[in-house]
Image (cartoon, grey):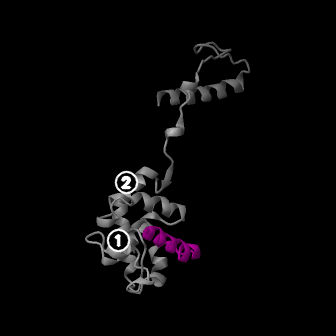
Amino acid sequence: MFKYKLFIDFLLIFGIISFFNSDINYSNNIVNDSNSISYNFTKEDIVDDSNVEEIVFDGLTMNELINKLDRNLYNELYGKGYLYATYSLEKNVDPYLAVAISLEETGCKWNCSNLVKYCNNVGGMIGSGCNGYSSWSSLDDGIRAFIDNISNNYVAYGLKTAYEMNAKYAENSMWASHVNNYINIIKKN
């Protein structure tokens, strides 16, 4: 951090001094005379920001987002924060929304439904293969299919929040309120 601040200070001084004086001298130390300033910096003085993590969602880095999601995923869904985070962002789906819908549809906050346990269905998606509901060979496949469903059938049509999705996604008019309660819990946790 100190080297970074020193480098920024150098750039500020250099810019100000060069505006008033075109004779800048680069040497081993700063000279306090009115005609020159000198500073010798090496490659090590310039901060390598390749290890700085990028903010990916809601002011969080990817690792922070994954950890936040994992703190809110329970039972069979625990440990799937990485998949929810990365695949949701890839598909332009709010990761909090994806997790919140999964929690609402599966009951996994307490005990996952049979749809999750036997069909790998995390969104209550209707289909064939599992007593009128869609089924996948793995939980990861089910999560991806669920996020694809939100992306292709809701977000693609401008329905990006639970309230916007409610009429199309669920018959229960309180569904969006329930999902948003989960979102608020996720944000605070």
Considering only vertical position in the picture, is 53 above or below 138?
above
Circle on res. 67: 2
Which residue corresponds to the image point at 48% horizontal and 83% vertical from the top-left?
Answer: 168
Which of 62/124 is in front? 124
Amino acid type, mark 1: Leu
In the image, is 34 to the left or to the right of 50?
right
- According to the picture, the residue beneath numbered tag 1 turns out to be 103
Q: Earlier in the sequence, mark 2 or mark 1?
A: 2
Q: Quick check: is 10 in the magenta stretch? A: no
- Which element carries disc 1, helix, strand or loop? helix
Query: Which of the 4 image quarters holds residue 28?
Result: top right
Using the numbered discs, state the Cα–Cα distance from disc 2 to disc 1 in whole angstroms: 17 Å
Q: Position of residue 19 (x, y in %)?
A: 71, 27
* Looking at the image, residue 62 lies above or below residue 52: below
Magenta-drawn segment: 141-160
Is 128 located above or below residue 120 in the figure? below
Picture quarter with the C terminus:
bottom left
Q: Main secondary structure of the magenta part?
A: helix
- State the residue at coordinates (66%, 15%): 36
Question: Could you say where residue 154 lies in the image, as x and y percent from the top left?
Answer: 53, 76
Q: Secondary structure at mark 2?
A: helix
Question: For mark 1, does the 10 Å Cα neighbourhood hold few (<14), some (14 to 19), or many (20 or more) residues?
Answer: many
**Callout 2: few (<14), some (14-19), or many (20+) C-alpha neighbours within 10 Å?**
some
